[in-house]
Structures are given as C-alpha cells and as structure tokens.
Amino acid sequence: MTGASRPKERTDAINGWHLDKRVPLAMIFAIVIQTIGIVAFVAQLENRVSHLEENDARAASMDLSGRIIRVETQLHGLNETTDRIERKVDSLIDRAGR
C-alpha cells in the first residue's frame, strides 16, 4: 500500500487531528468570541449571585434585629404593667391592714 492508496480513515488516524483548510476563519473567530462571552456571562452571574446572597443574609439579620427590638419593647411594657399591678396590690394590702 502506498500513501496515495491508503483509505481516508487510516490517513486521519496516522496524522492525528487537524483543522481542515475549508473551515472559514470567521467561524473560528465566532466560536472564540462566543466562548469569551459565555465565560464573561458566567463570571458576572456568579458575582450577582454572591451579591444577592450577601443581601439576603443582611436582610435576614436586619429582620431578626427588628424582631428583637419589638420583643424588647413588649417586655418593657410588661415590666411597667407588672410594676403597676404590684403597686396596686401593695396599696390594697395597706388598706386591708388598717
């Protein structure tokens, strides 16, 4: 078998992978640009997701802070009510003792 009579599959296997000269340069350029665009999009998407996660954690923390403030306010009101009740009970005890 001479080089000219070899089947195409065997020639490709011997020479390895190669780029055919019929592939237009514009096609290669378009694929490279699309790949760069996809990489940039994924990087930007990762940045946006990270930013949203930080904001979500901050919002959850602020919500918890707000809840704590409301509970403290209610607790303060309950303390005042308890003090008033104690004063009234003490006043009733003083009147009953006379």
Image (cartoon, rainbow, N blue to C red):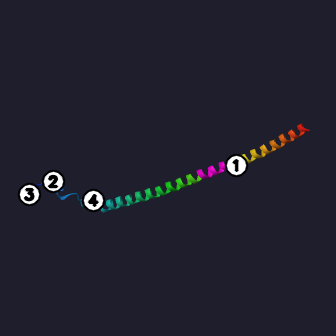
Q: Is residue 63 left or right of residue 82?
A: left
Residue situated in front as seen by the camera: 94 or 18 = 94
SS category of the residue bearing label 1? helix
Q: Is residue 9 magenta?
A: no
Marks 3 and 2, the one that precedes in the sequence:
3
x and y, in percent, of residue 58 in the image: 58, 54
x and y, in percent, of residue 55 in the image: 56, 54
The mark lying in front, picked from 1 and 4, is: 1
Which residue lies under the disc numbered 3? 2
Marks 4 and 3, the one that precedes in the sequence:
3
Q: CA distance from mark 1 to mark 3?
A: 94 Å
Q: Dot 2: within a 10 Å radius of its alpha carbon, few (fewer than 14), some, or many (20 or more) residues?
A: few
Q: Is residue 22 above or below residue 74?
A: below
Which residue lies under the disc numbered 1? 72
Q: Dot 3: within a 10 Å radius of its alpha carbon, few (fewer than 14), some, or many (20 or more) residues?
A: few
Q: Quadrant of the N terminus?
A: bottom left
x and y, in percent, of residue 71 in the image: 68, 47
Q: Is residue 24 left or right of residue 80?
A: left
The amino acid type found where label 1 is placed reads Glu
Which residue lies under the disc numbered 2? 10
Marks 1 and 3, the one that precedes in the sequence:
3
SS category of the residue bearing label 2? helix
Which residue lies under the disc numbered 4? 23
Q: CA distance from mark 2 to mark 4?
A: 22 Å
- Magenta residues, start to end: 60-69
Give residue 93's quadrant in the image: top right
